[in-house]
Image: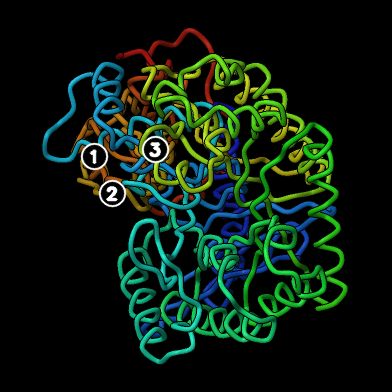
Amino acid sequence: MRRNNKLLKFNKIYKKYLIFCVVFLIGINPMTLFNLGNYIRNPLSTIDNTMITSLGIENGIIQQGWELVKKNNCTVLKAPVDDRLGSLSGSYMMLFGVQYLHPSNWESECSQNGLSRFLGELSEENPWQEITEKFTDILLDAGYTALGMDSACYNKMPFIYCFDVEPKEGWPPEYSWEEIMTEEWVEKARERVKEVSDKLRDDPLCIGCFLENEIFWHWRDLNISKDEWIAAHNRFIDVMVSAIKEYAPHWLIFSNKYAAALMEDAWEWMSPQIMRDAFLYDIEAGVDVICINDYLYSEEEARQIGPKLKMYEDILSAETNKSVTVMLSETGFQANRYEREKSLEEGHRYDLYERYTSTIYPQVDNQSERVRMMGITIDSIVKNGGLGLFMHAACDHGPQYAPWWQIWRRCSRYMNWGVYDPWRDKLYNEFLDGIKEVYKQAREKREHDMNITLWYGGPSDSDLDCDGELVWKDVKPGEILMGSFVIKNIGAINSELSWRVVSYPDWGEWTFTPLSGNNLTSGNSIIVEVSLVAPDEEERYSDYIQIVNTEDNKDFSVIPVILLPPQKIWSSWVPLGLPEGDNERKNPFSIL
């Protein structure tokens, strides 16, 4: 926490006691000025009172979830107030996410060998957890804020869980839409929602859920009529939304991730009107965010994606009379047209691994171009008030995608989207450095447009905060006084705080239990018990106790201390700032 915030808090506390003293002298009961017993803060109040709030009631207790906040035609998320979230608690956030961070990205032997060289020796017990946590740190440092679909662990970044309840079997999978019309599928889907919600319902990092991933795109080769498609679509939405509202009512609901190509590469009867009606059905059913997957082939498409999503929002908002959010839920950049055509013509001549590393795909190493194109895309979304976007994967696809390549013959579509290439044992540092600056500029523009401050992960730094004050009245000389205050780590998720009491008044005999501590994790707190033997002189005393983050001596907090003698009209003067000067006792770091 910044020094000026600590000073402000310190001054506010003393001003409170100044008012207390004044009203005491003029004979008014001071508690009439501070009686908040009948006041409950409105949990829905925001910067402009326009939002979609997720609230759930379980066992009579209201659970507040993440919120969609809109202001000045811009949309952001707001995290719930929860100490477990550290610095993220109650903060605003844009979605700069990664869809996949999962063991399937590293299943081949060559990729696992690359990871061992890159990350060092991994634990045998749970290597995927360790791999995912290390890559999460890389993503947070680069400015990413969320995971969007599939991960080996969910303990370091906000995330949106994606359900997988689509009827399918085998590999390559064979999909079925008829099964959705059966009661057996309904029961299976509801059981899956309950199972996941039981596991994640109380996780404050869980923003909400996607209903599915491109379920309707997977049906494009099936013989299904328009009426059958509409019936199956609506039944799927009804079952999933009703189950989520029952088992996790405080979650934000993100729609199935609709493939943008559905209108172009599916059935002859498919049309923009049918897709619009599907979106409208989602919204009326209770979906909070409409999600579209769109892979961009050109710079012009990148520049138009923001206006395109905004157009969808305006149309749907006008139709429903609701504030609708539409987001880019998955994106990446394809190879250029020449390279795609060449891969179709010559790809069968190459071994899959050789094809991946061959010179016909020079875009694999062109990281500056990737940054430029992502920058254009993100700038287009931010200028049009969008919520954010998700990049396809943290890791480039390679040999384990061979079954898809053999079917689609489009291998160029599944390359160079991630931040790490396990087959070449290479982290794309140039891309990470570039995207970090892109995200920084995007946050600054959104902060300016909405007049707010946005959270991002960054380095996992701890942040010290203290609550409490020590005020003793009618104190007699030599009396033993007891009190306490709270030390909290409000820093980044999974940070650890080491702290110490470094300065306290030189009058009386002080004991602190404990005097210091280590490894206080973010969102957690500890109570420090204080014992004081009052000084021999019967006077009014006021001073402060200082606690410091031992790994950052600029990060400190103060606890006010006031002793009042019995039966005296005491002055209302109290210090309104931290003392300055050469007095060693008042140097907050004098005993470090």
Residue 463 spot, x, y in % from top left? 43, 33
Q: Amino acid at mark 2?
A: Gly
Query: Foreground: 112 or 550?
Result: 112
Depth check, mark 3 against mark 2: the one in front is 2
Q: Which residue is mark 3?
A: 539
**Disc marking residue 483:** 2
Work out which residue is located at the far bottom of the displayed protein and give it. 183
Frontmost residue, 196 versus 94: 196
At a point 43% along the width and 90% down the height, the residue shown is 182
Residue type, label 3: Glu
Q: Residues within 10 Å of mark 1 (few under 14, many from 20)?
A: some
Distance (Cα) linking label 3 and label 2: 19 Å
469 or 24, which lies in front? 469
SS of the residue at dot 3? loop
- Marks 2/1 in contact by CB < 8 Å: the verdict is yes
Q: Earlier in the sequence, mark 2 or mark 1?
A: 2
Q: Tell me if I can see residue 576 in this picture.
A: no
Amino acid under label 1? Leu
Residue 2: x and y in percent read 55, 28
Foreground label between 2 and 1: 2
From this view, report whether residue 254 is shown above or below residue 102.
below
405 vs 434: above or below: below
Q: Which residue is mark 1?
A: 532
